[in-house]
Image (cartoon, coloured by chain):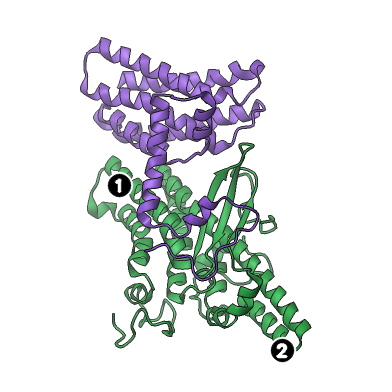
Chain colours: A purple, B green
Amino acid sequence: MAATSGARSPAAVGGSPPQEIQELDETVVATVLRDLRNVAGKLRLVLLPTGSPEQTLKELRNWDLWGPLLLCLVLSLSLSFGAPAGQVSLVFSGVFVLMWAGAAVVTLNAQLLGGSVSFFQSVCVLGYCLFPLVIAAVAGLLIRNGVVRSVLVVAGWVWATRASVVFMQSLLPPSKRALAIYPVGLFYLVWAWMVYVE
Amino acid sequence: MAQAGASPFEDDVQVSGEIGDEQTSWNNIICKSSRPSVAFFTVAFRFAALILYLLNGFVGMDYVTLFVVTVLLLACDFWTIKNVSGRLLVGLRWGTRVTETGQTEWYFLTHPERAGNAKPADSRIFWLSLFLAPLLWLLLGVAALLSFSLDWLVLCSFALALTGTNTYGYYKCSAAARQRLQQALADSAIKAAVGGGGGSAFGTALISSMFGSSGAQPASGGAAAAAAPAATAARGSPAPGQAVTSKPGKAFEGDATGLGDDDAGGFVHSSEGGDGVPSRNPFDDDVAV
């Protein structure tokens, strides 16, 4: 599938950036790699926020939902492994629903407080920031020592909340920030508790 | 390939018969497509997910495994249809991007050559699978709701969200493409009328054939039911995207010089502002694109 653009050179109407023009003719492999790089980049940003906060925010604003889906699947699987036999399917679907509904509720809360946040951007950020807790959950499957697990879970919670607060902070005026950040912390606290109890 | 002598790459092959016709099976259609592998994957992932869900009794997977496999199949399907099938089969692509103010806007692209000239087999496969799958998942979701199995309801609503988003994106994209085409035809019709002769008749004939043609389409009541709330009076055909590509396909080739002069086939770039909050009616045709 070579990139051909035909006899007429495509003229962009309305000044669209050239990236989209290339999108129509790129190879399948290029598309896959582009999406993979997006996801990997965001995951790395959540773990190790390098660069200025503005840069991080800009990167996180190009939302995609593949990362949260992947994280959701991994978290659901790892939590359902530890569940008692009769409740496996309940835990699995419960985690799924909790993740998306919880992210939606936290986003709605931020929106209703008057923040100018796009729904999908916020859900994307909340999903990606779950990454430290997912690591804690997977590690918790292997490590049975209670103390180590609680340390891991607390570290995961702090990390996740801190990463998402960077994003949420930018959306609202200082007077309302605490009101928006509190549900985020609570959201991750619920996850941390579920990971610990697993 | 049951029909001897019909090379799948021959441009003059007319796909005769409708989907229900015993001569025409999915195999034949996929072979007649200009890109059989793309057409195959367009159909394969979504119907594999559906079949896996429906035949779970025979396959005997437990809930978690089935859920994970279905979600992965649906994710592959979403990615394939969004990034590969639309581009290569019908020359359309939709996407979202974030503006400077932080709002999400949808953009719609049309390939200058492929958009108006999709082969009938390609467009049939594409639009049928695009409209059938969300409809089936909706029915399955209602069945799950009525039987109070919330586990399956979660899976069905997730499937509906994924397949429905693709359908919505491509529907909007084809609406945008059709609007541009109408514009181009109107412009060229005006030009021809001013220049004299039967050009205007040809132009208006094209426009009316675009919206009036339903002969080549299968009587898919399901697709009609899904699209009926969406279709305004002007768009009479049950599967709007097909109207662009099925009958007048040849006519566009003949008129290519007219379109080329206006450079109306150039990259269409239309977008609608606002972020994709579902409170907006997705089939509101009056949204300015």
Q: Residue at x 63, y 53 (%)?
A: A15
Q: Which residue is mark 2?
A: B198
Q: Which residue is mark 1?
A: B69
* Residue type for callout 2: Gly
Q: Is residue B102 left or right of residue B66?
A: right
Q: Quadrant of residue A128?
A: top left
Q: Nearer the viewer, mark 2 or mark 1?
A: 2
Position above or below: A136 against A26: above
Q: Residue at x 55, y 59 (%)?
A: B109
**Residue B8: % across, % down:** 35, 79
Position above or below: B207 against B109: below
Which residue is nearer to you in this view: B222 or A22?
Answer: A22
**Residue B12: % across, % down:** 43, 85
Q: Is residue B154 left or right of residue B269?
A: left
**Residue B212: % across, % down:** 62, 78
Sequence-wise, the earlier of marks 2 and 1 is: 1
The local secondary structure at tag 2 comes to loop
Q: Chain of mark 1?
A: B
Give the distance between the C-alpha atoms of the residues marked 2 and 1, in whole angstroms. Answer: 58 Å
